[in-house]
Image (cartoon, rainbow, N blue to C red):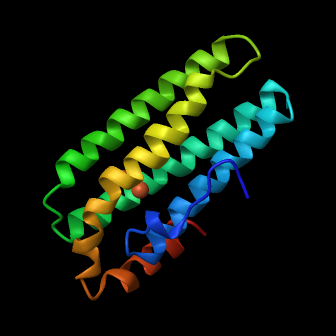
Amino acid sequence: MGFSDWTPQYTVNNPVMDEHHQTIFKMVNQLHEAIFAKKAKESLGVIISSLMDYTERHFAEEERIMQQHNYPGYLQHKAAHEHLSAQAQEFKLKYMAGDNTISSELFYFLVSDLLVKHILNMDKKYAPFLKNAPSARAECMLQNASVYP
Ligand SMILES: [Fe+2]
Ligand SMILES: [Fe+2]
């Protein structure tokens, strides 16, 4: 049991997107454990960079799927991704330029804004649109195989 775990309430009715979200939760837990274990700044920096890279690729894939299925909230969702990415980048730069203690603000942002608020408030809104598209699962799996070898 991690600090914050994916539970079925977070499902977006798409197995590939659910898998991505589960991975993001795991990476946030990994970061939490590393902070708790007082790992060196370099180690935490590597975890933060991996988490941000994975999240960026997830956002791109999610946007591709939403666009492909003509999700009406696509532009608003894409803007929310861009806002989260910019915030994450700002936190990372501040952290890398600052002292060896990770800001509690950064962790609050990852758990609250990225995981809970974004997935619960925004990602779940596209769930019915993908669920009703019969080819969504097969398309996502094919794409996933090529983007995440
Ligand atoms: Fe999203
Ligand atoms: Fe997502």
Q: Give the farthest residue toward the top.
A: 98
Q: Position of residue 24 (x, y in %)?
A: 57, 54
Side of 104 where 9 appears, left or right: left
Instruction: Look at 50% across and 65% down and name the residue there.
Output: 147
**140 or 122: nearer the viewer:** 122
Q: Is residue 92 visible?
A: no
Side of 104 where 144 appears, left or right: left
Q: How many marks?
A: 0
Side of 103 where 119 appears, left or right: left
> Residue 93 lies in what quarter of the image?
top right
Instruction: Look at 42% across and 36% down and name the residue there.
Output: 85
> Residue 87 lies in what quarter of the image?
top left
Q: Where is residue 139 in the image (x, y as percent from the top left)?
A: 36, 80
For the N terminus, the image quarter is bottom right
Q: Where is residue 128 in the image (x, y as percent from the top left)?
A: 24, 73
Q: Give the farthest residue toward the bottom.
A: 134
Q: Position of residue 12 (x, y in %)?
A: 38, 68
Placement of 85 over or under 22, stated as above or below: above
Instruction: Look at 60% across and 32% down and name the residue there.
Output: 107
Placement of 121 over or under 124, stated as above or below: above
Placement of 9 over or under 40, stated as above or below: below
Placement of 112 over or under 98, stated as above or below: below
Instruction: Look at 61% across and 69% down and name the residue there.
Output: 149
